[in-house]
Amino acid sequence: MKKYKGTLQNHTKSHFFANFHKNFTKLAKNIYIYVGSIMTIPERQHIKRDGYAEAMRYIANAKGYLQKAGMDNKGFYGDKKYVRTACGTAYNGVLEALNTYLKLKNPDVLKTDERKTIDFYRKNLAKDNRKTLKALETAYHILHVCGYYEGAKDSDFIKLGFKSAKELIDLIKPAEAA
């Protein structure tokens, strides 16, 4: 047996943790482990790609509705109906992106059958990132509350909501779409 500085017991512990860390990083390159769920990297990439494509499809449709709304020379959209539809569609794209983001973080969080409220998203995003939470709040208030429910027609205001929506959707942007 080789002589080590310190006791044999301390050496065994440090050897164990060194090998554990080495094996864990090797494992982490190929697989992510969550509480009760295992997801491989190709599965994560597939979920990201599909979620991002769906969310961007919502945003593209919303931009089409805004074009149908037309704009006057004062910077306001002309037809409230199309602005409301556009804001609702863009907000649904945000929800698609957030569901994908949460599914990647912890797949078990979305398995409940109950309807998800804004408080559900706030609670789950507050754990991760304050900047993301602020983007959610902006998108929620501008697109959902002001745009969809109240029918706000100010183009600069609506563009700010779309900017926040794009920021949230970019959370799940796959590497090949970068």
Image (cartoon, rainbow, N blue to C red):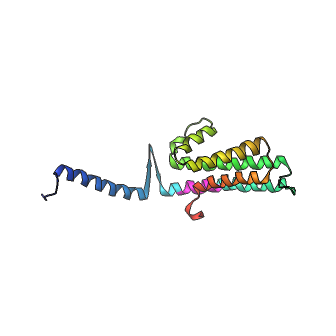
Depth check: 65 or 50 in front? 65
Q: Residue at x 60, y 63 (%)?
A: 177
Using the rendered image of the protein, determine whether residue 170 is visible from the camera's viewpoint: yes
Total number of numbered discs in the rendering: 0
In percent of width and height, residue 110 lies at: 56, 41
In percent of width and height, residue 39 lies at: 47, 51
Q: Residue at x 18, y 49 (%)?
A: 9
Depth check: 64 or 143 in front? 143
Q: Is residue 122 magenta?
A: no
Query: To which quarter of the image does residue 174 belong?
Result: bottom right
- Which image quarter holds the N terminus? bottom left
**Residues drawn in magenta:** 45-53
- Which image quarter holds the C terminus? bottom right
Q: Residue furthest top?
A: 114
Q: Residue furthest front?
A: 74
Query: To which quarter of the image does residue 112 belong?
Result: top right
Magenta region's main secondary structure? helix
- Report the side of 15 relative to 33 (left or right): left
Q: Residue at x 36, y 54 (%)?
A: 24
Q: Residue at x 80, y 51 (%)?
A: 154
- Report the side of 90 relative to 47 (left or right): right
In percent of width and height, residue 83 lies at: 80, 49
In percent of width and height, residue 19 lies at: 29, 56
Using the rendered image of the protein, determine whether residue 116 is visible from the camera's viewpoint: no
